[in-house]
């Protein structure tokens, strides 16, 4: 859904294909390319580039966007950016009141979809951590899904009362997580700890919000950051989803669900996915356990006898 929304008619990538197309490809190459990872293992300059994650791709996109006129040049202002507290207060429940029961009921389908998407965020985050955790024996990353739910719920409760912005209500900023984990893989010199690296990312971002020159310089190209984030999210979601598929039946269900989701939106895609899962893929627990406990066939590890007197060798499957 993230990718289709960007490349469809009216999407940002569709409207600014030169800058976002090149910048998106550069970002994917830096973050996920196996060949660039080989370069990073050999050369310092490549490690320095990959250490900044999606930032190089965003800077290239900005430069191209300004150069070809797809994005307007900024009007840089100097000073300190003061949040619009009056405007924020106008949207708080203390000003406009609590929503009525009818609105609460109408929001239930959206809430269910949001939770399913948030659940996918947690799976993506766990996968990103697993890919680098074994590369750093100096630190063991503790992943507690219950704690993720608790912290996200408390934060969203505060957001709903003080800064209601659903766009930041998810448990994971995929682009930032991919950036942090890619830098983490290169050892303590690149990042002391996954916790300190993540904290520094958000602390610096918090202070940057008050730097008016940065705010005004990046304001015209904010869609670039959002688009690149969504492209990274879509790529990782596809990669992680394929890893969850264990057989051809699940692949068929996932494929049809993906097609419906891309053409008719998340609600239809998730609905069709649930129907097909229970109709085609779901099995009783006893049947799944029995299949998992089936012994390996002897033929799979059979040894072929040789006639020339040499020691037998394992057969090719």
Image: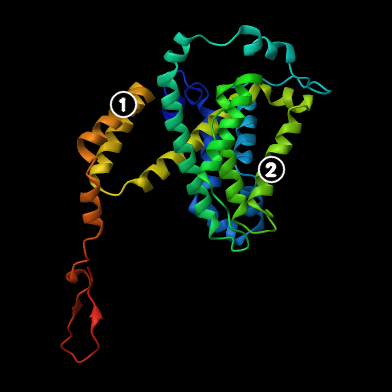
Q: Residue furthest right?
A: 79
The residue drawn where x is 25% and y is 47% is 285
Quarter of the image that includes the C terminus: bottom left
- The label number, if any, that marks residue 271 in the structure image: 1
Residue 47 position in % (x across, y down): 63, 54
- The label number, if any, that marks residue 65 in the structure image: none
The answer to which of 49 and 317 lies nearer the viewer is: 317
Residue 160 position in % (x across, y down): 60, 21
The residue drawn where x is 56% and y is 38% is 175
The residue drawn where x is 73% and y is 37% is 204
Examine the rendered structure and indicate whether residue 253 appears above or below residue 270.
Answer: below
Q: Secondary structure at mark 1?
A: helix
Q: Secondary structure at mark 2?
A: helix
Q: Report the Cα–Cα distance between label 2 and label 1.
A: 37 Å
Quarter of the image that includes the N terminus: top left
Examine the rendered structure and indicate whether residue 182 appears above or below residue 255.
Answer: below
The residue drawn where x is 53% and y is 47% is 144
Q: Residue furthest left?
A: 307
Quarter of the image holding residue 68? top right
Q: Which residue is mark 2?
A: 199
């Amino acid at each position: 859904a993230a990718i289709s929304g960007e490349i469809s008619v009216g999407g940002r990538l569709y409207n600014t294909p030169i800058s976002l197309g090149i910048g998106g490809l550069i970002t994917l190459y830096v973050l996920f390319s196996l060949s660039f990872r080989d370069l990073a293992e050999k050369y310092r300059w490549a490690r320095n580039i990959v250490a900044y994650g999606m930032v190089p791709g965003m800077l290239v996109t900005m430069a191209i966007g300004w150069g070809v006129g797809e994005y307007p040049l900024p009007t840089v202002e100097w000073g300190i950016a003061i949040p619009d507290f009056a405007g924020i207060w106008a949207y708080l429940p203390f000003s406009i009141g609590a929503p009525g029961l009818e609105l609460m009921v109408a929001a239930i389908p959206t809430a269910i979809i949001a939770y399913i998407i948030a659940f996918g965020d947690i799976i993506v985050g766990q996968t990103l951590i697993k890919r680098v955790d074994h590369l750093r024996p100096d630190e063991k990353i503790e992943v507690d899904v219950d704690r993720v739910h608790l912290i996200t719920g408390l934060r969203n409760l505060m957001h709903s009362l003080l800064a209601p912005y659903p766009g930041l209500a998810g448990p994971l900023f995929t682009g930032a997580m991919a950036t942090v984990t890619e830098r983490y893989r290169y050892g303590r010199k690149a990042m002391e700890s996954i916790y300190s690296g993540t904290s520094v990312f958000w602390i610096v971002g918090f202070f940057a919000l008050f730097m008016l020159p940065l705010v005004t310089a990046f304001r015209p190209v904010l869609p670039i950051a959002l688009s690149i984030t969504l492209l990274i999210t879509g790529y990782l979601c596809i990669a992680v989803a394929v890893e969850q598929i264990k057989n051809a039946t699940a692949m068929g269900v996932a494929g049809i669900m993906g097609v419906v989701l891309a053409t008719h939106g998340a609600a239809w895609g998730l609905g069709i996915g649930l129907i097909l899962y229970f109709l085609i893929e779901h099995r009783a627990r006893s049947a799944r356990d029995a299949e998992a406990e089936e012994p390996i066939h002897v033929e799979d590890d059979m040894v072929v006898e040789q006639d020339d007197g040499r020691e037998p060798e394992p057969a090719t499957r």
